[in-house]
Amino acid sequence: MNNYQKQMKALAEKLTHMIFNLLGNISEEQKRWIGSTNLCEAVQLNFYPCCPEPNRAMGLAPHTDTSLLTILHQSQTNGLQIFQEGAGWVPVHPHPGTLFVHTGDILHILSNSWFRCALHRVMVNSMRQRYSAAYFYAPPMDHVVSPLVLDSLPRFRSLTVKEYIGIKAKNLGGALSLISMLNNN
């Protein structure tokens, strides 16, 4: 597990540098936390047993991840679904030897909604059990997350990772709207 976490951290750092390069105008101060030892990171192992009536059970309710990004390794059993505007719940079919990466709330805030956090859920399967290993990657708790503003107004107020985690713990589905600087985000 330690080796897996180290490998995922290295990958997350590379992806974060790529994302920040794409966004541009990220100050050195905002990037300084990358590679530090006091990150908010975690590995979560998930097991979803077979369910004889999958339409009457939920593996994991719809949610967004608090992290900057999540790297997911999943077994070859379908179950993960992403909500897509206009299409509804879209299955994410697992492919051997691949990892699935999706964005979380911290990147949504930092990018001023340019990278949207991925609303997702997990459905159970009637015939096969499902395993996954999720690696969550975010800046340290005391890091101030400020929206990157290029040609628009900030959609969110600046706050620390710890403050956002506290807000989300009390308002799971509405945390982003509580820090919104606009009427609609």
Image: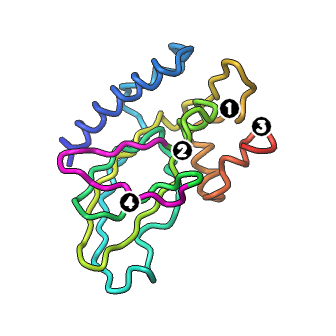
| Residue 111 image-quadrant placement | top right
Q: Is residue 131 left or right of residue 80?
A: left
For the residues labelled 3 and 2, the Cα–Cα distance comes to 17 Å
On the rendered structure, is 106 left or right of 180? left
- Residue named by callout 3: 181
Assign a secondary structure to mark 1: loop
For the residues labelled 1 and 2, the Cα–Cα distance comes to 17 Å
Highlighted magenta segment, given as a residue range: 87-103
Three-letter amino acid code at the position of disc 1: Ser
Within the magenta stretch, is there residue 61? no
Q: Are marks 4 and 1 in contact (CB under 8 Å)?
A: no
Q: Is residue 147 left or right of residue 29?
A: right
Amino acid at the residue labelled 2: Cys
Q: Residues within 10 Å of mark 4 (few under 14, many from 20)?
A: many
Residue 161 image point, x, y percent: 56, 39
Write down the residue under mark 4.
Answer: 80
Q: Nearer the viewer, mark 1 or mark 2?
A: 2
Q: Amino acid at mark 3?
A: Met
* Rendered location of residue 52, percent (x, y): 32, 86
Of labels 1 and 3, earlier in sequence is 1
* Residue at the disc numbered 2: 117
Q: Earlier in the sequence, mark 3 or mark 4?
A: 4
